[in-house]
Amino acid sequence: FDNREYSADADEASAKEAARRHIQDGSIGYTNAEVVVKLGGWDLKHARDVAQGCLSALKQLILSDNQLTGKKSLYIRLGCRGDWPNIKPPGWDPSSGVDPSPES
């Protein structure tokens, strides 16, 4: 755990700017994140409450779609090409600009 990876930005705009700087510097840890949870300071009880809330939300998400973990696994195996949640067929190239139609 490297605390330097987490910013103390006060608002969303400065957090986005920090993320842009991290990407330019080669740190791409959050570029594909669907959610980033940010704490404005460290309080053990508050951090535990936030962590518990995050875990509860993840559990609800996973239980709401029994195929979610399989779809996410396929997405990762195909190389996280930016087509989540509508995964395109193998061989699809996002730079081609062509949206393949499903094969019948």
Image: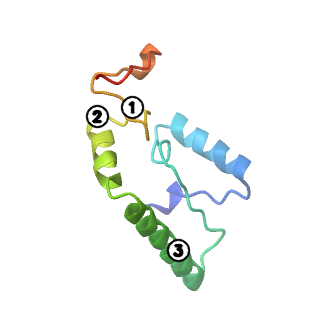
Q: CA distance from mark 1 to mark 3?
A: 29 Å
Vertical placement of residue 21 versus 102, above or below: below
Tag 1 near tag 2, CB within 8 Å = yes
Vertical placement of residue 16 versus 97, above or below: below
Looking at the rendered structure, the number of numbered marks drawn on it comes to 3
x and y percentages locating residue 54 in the rendered image: 50, 69
**Within-10-Å neighbours for mark 3: few <14, some 14–19, many 20+:** few
**From the image, which quarter does the N terminus lie in?**
bottom left
Q: In the current view of this chain or complex, which residue is farthest to the bottom? A: 45
Q: Which residue is mark 3?
A: 53
Q: Secondary structure at mark 1?
A: loop
Residue 1 appears in the picture as rendered: no
Which amino acid lies under the numbered mark 3 shown in the image of this protein? Gly
Q: Which residue is mark 1?
A: 81
Tag 1 near tag 3, CB within 8 Å = no
Q: Which residue is mark 2?
A: 78
The quarter of the picture where residue 94 lies is top left
The quarter of the picture where residue 21 lies is top right
**From the image, which quarter does the C terminus lie in?**
top left
**Within-10-Å neighbours for mark 2: few <14, some 14–19, many 20+:** some
Name the residue rendered at 55%, 74% in the picture. 50
Q: How is the image coloured?
A: rainbow
x and y percentages locating residue 48 in the rendered image: 51, 80
Vertical placement of residue 7 versus 27, above or below: below
Q: Nearer the viewer, residue 83 or 7?
A: 83
